[in-house]
Image: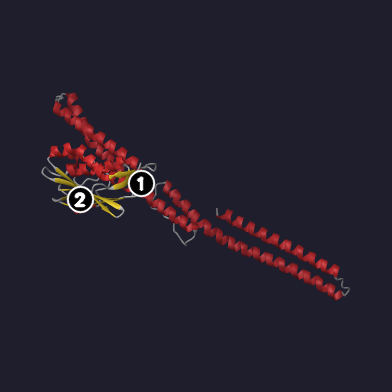
Amino acid sequence: MKKKLLWTFITVASVMVALASVIYLIEMHHHVSMYQKKFPLPNSHQIYYDYHFEQAIIQSTVWTAIGTIFLAVLVSYYIANRISSPLTEMRHVAEQMIKGNWESRVKVKGNDEVANLGEALNVLTSQLQEHEVLRQHLTSDIAHELRTPLATLKSHMEAFEDGVWKPTPERIHSCQEELDRLIHLVGDLEQLTKVESPGFSLKCKEENLVDIVKQIFISMEANFKRKQVRWKLEAPHQAIVWVDRNRMSQIIINLLTNALTYTPSGGIVTISIIIIEKKVKIIIQDTGIGIPDAELARVFERFYRVDKSRSRKLGGNGIGLAIVKKLVEAHKGIIRIESKVGEGTSVTISIPTAK
């Protein structure tokens, strides 16, 4: 590539200099001839002077052209080297990326377009490296999540087949629970893939957030009564927001389900809606078991669970909050969580009121 650029620059510069020099010499000779025809001078010394003057101009022009071409060669070499070196390095980095070496980076120098291209490639490499790490973790996490219910089902089926166990309703129900866990996991993975896809979009329109929450409480009222957990809504008459009703319902249902799951009987779950300037805050607070401070930063990571054994018994797979975070961000909102062990957890969502 460097040689092609160098010869291209040299050829273009040389042709331009040579063409300009030839045109200049032709024009100069033409005007000298016109001058001599219009003002004939029989003086031999003057004729000799005109001849040497014309020769001096020709030689000066030729030597200037040669020097300019030589300078063009040097400048072309510098420019070709300046352009081709980082591009060659970028190609090398791209080849390393193809081989799976994500540690390669382009050495960026200067602040021109080529340097910007190198920075962009470095950013792309970093992002691909992060996605590769996430992909590996995701594959490992999925395998781990599938292994336990599948192993349980396999052991049950083998015991039934060998006659060790009789297919009692209790044992069949145990198999049914493992199947439900698998179906739930696949459904959550499908949802997460959908919200993370480039083509994902919301169907937003003006909605009264208070009406959405009241409708959700009606549908979940039986679950709260069954576990003997009280719920309370603190909200104005209306809070108009620009949201996708179905997706916002999904966010609130997921958070309320978590709050109900980890709140013992006799506890209370409170949802507050506060309008602040051009934003609406939704605060879901429970009196549950709480989350340790060291774990708060990771609760929105996919497949991450504070207490894996307890979460598995309660049916959690660590994907719900990851979906919630993606949906909140799709609404141009912010979600944060605060918690204290033994006292409860508070989740705050802030979304804009306008389109």
User: Could you say where residue 52 lies in the image, as x and y percent from the top left?
Assistant: 79, 72
**Residue drawn at 78 percent across, 69 percent down:** 54
Cα–Cα gap, marks 2 and 1: 33 Å
- Mark 2–mark 1 contact, CB under 8 Å? no
**Nearer the observer, 166 or 324:** 324
User: Could you say where residue 355 lies in the image, as x and y percent from the top left?
Assistant: 36, 48
Q: Is residue 71 left or right of residue 136?
A: right
Count all numbered tags in the image, as a single digit. 2
Residue wearing tag 1: 132
Q: Is residue 53 left or right of residue 170?
A: right
Q: Earlier in the sequence, mark 2 or mark 1?
A: 1
User: Could you say where residue 229 lies in the image, as x and y percent from the top left?
Assistant: 13, 42
- Secondary element under disc 1, as helix, strand or loop, is helix
The relative height of residue 113 versus residue 327 in the rendered view (above or below) is below
User: Could you say where residue 161 lies in the image, as x and y percent from the top left?
Assistant: 19, 24
Q: Is residue 68 left or right of residue 325?
A: right
Q: Does residue 67 appear in the picture of this structure? A: yes
The extreme left residue here reads 266
The extreme front residue here reads 237
**Nearer the observer, 13 or 176:** 176
Q: Which image quarter: residue 146?
A: top left
Q: Residues within 10 Å of mark 2 (few under 14, many from 20)?
A: many
**Colour convention of the picture:** secondary structure
- Secondary element under disc 2, as helix, strand or loop, is strand
Amino acid at pointer 2: Ser
Amino acid at pointer 1: Glu
**Residue drawn at 43 percent across, 49 percent down:** 96
Q: Which image quarter: residue 182?
A: top left
**Residue drawn at 17 percent across, 29 percent down:** 173
Q: Which image quarter: residue 106?
A: bottom left
The relative height of residue 312 versus residue 11 in the rendered view (above or below) is above
Residue wearing tag 2: 346
